[in-house]
Structures are given as C-alpha cells and as structure tokens.
C-alpha cells in the first residue's frame, strides 16, 4: 500500500512538473520572441547585428518545448533530471560570452603560395621545338602555358607561333603579341612625353625607360621600320640622360643602347655611344666589345684590330664571347 501510494505521488509530482515546464516554457518563449522583434523605426548602430529571431525559429523553440514535455511525462524522474542536469552543465561549463575584441574584419587580400605544378613543368619544352609537333592539342596547351607565364620575356617565341599550321595557335599568338606590343608603344610614347616635360634635374623616366625598351627591342619582334624607330627613340632617351647627368648612365646602359643601334645598322649613332662609353668607363669590357662589334659588323678591319690591341694592353679580362669574336675576325 505504501509503495503504491509513493508511486502515485511520484507520478503526480512528475506530471505537475512536466505541465509546469510546458506552460512556463511556452509563456517564456512567447515573451522573449516579442522582445526580440526588430523595431523598424530604429536605425541599426552595430556593425555586427544580432541574430534575427524569425517566426520559424520561434515555432522551432515551441516544438522543442513540447517534445521535452512529452519526454518528461513518459520518463518520470529520469526525464526531468536529464534536462535539468544538461541545462545546468551548459550554464556552468559551456556557456560563455563571445569576445570579438580580437577579431579584425579586413578586406586586405591574402597572398597564397601555390605548390608548383610538377606535371606541367615536366612537359615544358622550347616553343621552337613545340612548333614542329603535329599534335594540335599539345601545341595549343603549350601556347596557353606560355601566355600564362612571363609574356614580355617570351615575345620572340610567341612570334614564331604566328607561322604555325594550326590556325588556333596562330590566333593565340597574334592576339597576345598585339596586346603586348600595343602596351609597349603606349608606355614608350607616354614616358617620352614625360621626359620632354620634366625639369633638367629629373632623370627618373630616362633611367626606367632605357631598360624597359631594351627588354622588348632585344627580342626583335617589330617590323624593320618600327624596330629602327624605337632604337632611335632609345638613343634619344639616352641623349636626354647624358645631357642632364651623364653619371647616371651605367656601362650596361651604354651597351644596351649601342647594341640596339647595331641591330638597325645605325653605325654613326652607335659610334658616338661607343666613344662616350670608352671615355666614361675605359676599364670596362663592354666599352671594348661594343666597338669590336661595331667594326666587325661594318667591316672596318683597321679600327677593329686597333681596339683589339688596346684591349690586349689593358687589364680587362676577356670573356669567351669576345675571344670568339676576335678569332672569327682574325
């Protein structure tokens, strides 16, 4: 009798607790949901808005409350204890306020280092050899890989593809080459205008334009007339720099200008630059090699051997290219 009474009391208390939980839970969620409704008349002031409480979310919370009520009703003592202990642990151990003090919202891009594509690198061959390949698919893939790389350094190789039997490859090459050459023309013209407008103390544009022009002109991708035009413009840029501040012209600059003039057989202008280089850098190998190449190309043997004797008497170390030039002419 006592056990039966205790069981009935336990069932009654459990039912009372379950019903109380259901009523209080539904009332609490209803009140909380009304407080969280956004006020359209108030402008948001926070950069990180609170999570909006939608009607669907309120329904989910009510369904969850009813589900807990059913579990508590069907599992006397165990059900209420389970939810009570779970809620207690959440409040004590897991529930923490989110600290956004150290969070930085930045739009700066992050540079990612991508692994080398070993399969692609393993298949790379010189374009000159690839143009002989009859497989159109492989040739097109190679051309796309070249275009994706340093295009400005590969203009000469891309120009070779213009004569490819594959029309698609020739189209790739023509399109890229035209864009790059147009960019070069625009940059040179704009820089030359800046040079003509700058003061006598400014030499930045000249110092930047000479190596830029040499990098493209050395690949000889222009027509003969245009190549000659840009070689003369490069020489004029050097004249501006020489007149303003000759000390800014390096031995490398002298060599670049001389060789680009040699490409278009402007021997008179080249000789002027060779004499300037010899006067400013008498102990540099480039000062001798420029004159040797000039006299070798223009077939002036006496002047060639005179410069060769001067080179032998100097303390300048001769490289293999110069030695081969002397042997060939001798």
Image (cartoon, rainbow, N blue to C red):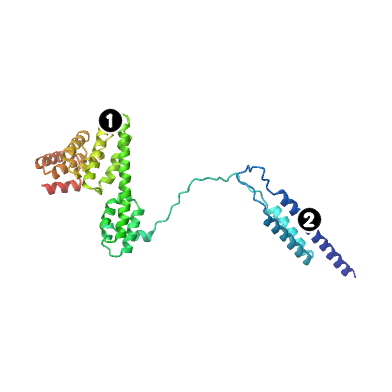
Q: How many labels does the image show?
A: 2
Q: Nearer the viewer, residue 164 or 306?
A: 164
Indicate the secondary structure of the residue bearing disc 1: helix
Disc 1 and disc 2: Cα gap in Å? 90 Å
Residue appearing at x 26%, y 45% in the figure: 217
Query: How many residues crowd mark 2 within 10 Å: few (<14), some (14–19), many (20+)?
Result: few
Residue 235 in the figure: left or right of residue 148: left
Camera sees residue 208? no
Residue 19 in the figure: left or right of residue 252: right
Lower sequence index among marks 1 and 2? 2
Q: Quadrant of the N terminus?
A: bottom right
Residue that sits furthest to the front in the current view? 41
Q: Which of 164 and 256 is in front in this view?
A: 164
Tell me residue 151's x, y (percent): 33, 51
Location of residue 168 (image quadrant): bottom left
Q: Are marks 1 and 2 in contact (CB under 8 Å)?
A: no
Q: Mark 1 points at which residue?
A: 244
Q: Is residue 112 above or below residue 210?
A: below
Residue 151 in the figure: left or right of residue 3: left
Tell me residue 202's x, y (percent): 32, 31
Camera sees residue 22? yes
Indicate the secondary structure of the residue bearing disc 2: helix
In the drawing, what numbered circle is on residue 92?
Answer: none
Q: Name the residue under label 2.
A: 24
Tell me residue 61's x, y (percent): 71, 57
Query: How many residues crowd mark 1 within 10 Å: few (<14), some (14–19), many (20+)?
Result: some
Q: In this view, does 246 lie above or below 13?
A: above
Tell me residue 279's x, y (percent): 20, 33
Residue that sits furthest to the left in the current view? 302
Residue appearing at x 82%, y 63% in the figure: 15
Q: In this view, does 55 lie above or below 311?
A: below
């Amino acid at each position: 009798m006592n056990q039966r009474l205790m069981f009935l009391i336990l069932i009654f208390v459990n039912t009372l607790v379950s019903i109380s939980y259901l009523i209080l839970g539904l009332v609490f969620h209803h009140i909380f949901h009304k407080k969280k409704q956004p006020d359209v008349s108030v402008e948001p002031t926070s950069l990180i808005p609170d999570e909006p409480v939608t009607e669907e979310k309120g329904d989910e919370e009510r369904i969850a409350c009813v589900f807990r009520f059913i579990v508590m009703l069907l599992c006397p003592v165990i059900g209420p204890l389970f939810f009570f202990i779970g809620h207690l642990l959440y409040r004590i151990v897991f529930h923490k306020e989110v600290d956004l003090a150290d969070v930085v919202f930045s739009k700066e891009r992050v540079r990612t280092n991508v692994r080398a594509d070993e399969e692609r690198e393993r298949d790379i061959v010189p374009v000159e050899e690839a143009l002989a390949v009859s497989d159109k698919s492989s040739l097109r893939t190679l051309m796309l890989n070249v275009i994706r790389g340093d295009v400005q350094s590969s203009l000469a190789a891309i120009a070779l593809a213009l004569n490819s039997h594959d029309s698609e490859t020739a189209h790739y090459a023509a399109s890229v080459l035209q864009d790059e050459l147009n960019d070069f023309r625009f940059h040179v013209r704009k820089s030359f205008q800046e040079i003509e407008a700058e003061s006598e103390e400014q030499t930045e544009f000249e110092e930047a334009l000479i190596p830029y022009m040499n990098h493209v002109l050395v690949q000889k991708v222009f027509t003969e007339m245009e190549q000659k035009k840009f070689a003369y413009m490069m020489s004029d840029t050097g004249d501006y720099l020489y007149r303003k501040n000759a000390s800014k012209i390096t031995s490398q600059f002298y060599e670049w200008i001389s060789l680009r003039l040699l490409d278009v057989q402007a021997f008179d202008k080249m000789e002027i630059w060779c004499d300037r280089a010899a006067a400013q850098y008498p102990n540099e190998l480039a000062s001798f090699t420029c004159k040797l190449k000039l006299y070798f190309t223009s077939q002036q043997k006496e002047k060639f051997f005179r410069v060769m004797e001067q080179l032998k008497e100097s303390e300048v170390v001769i490289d293999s290219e110069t030695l081969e030039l002397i042997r060939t002419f001798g």
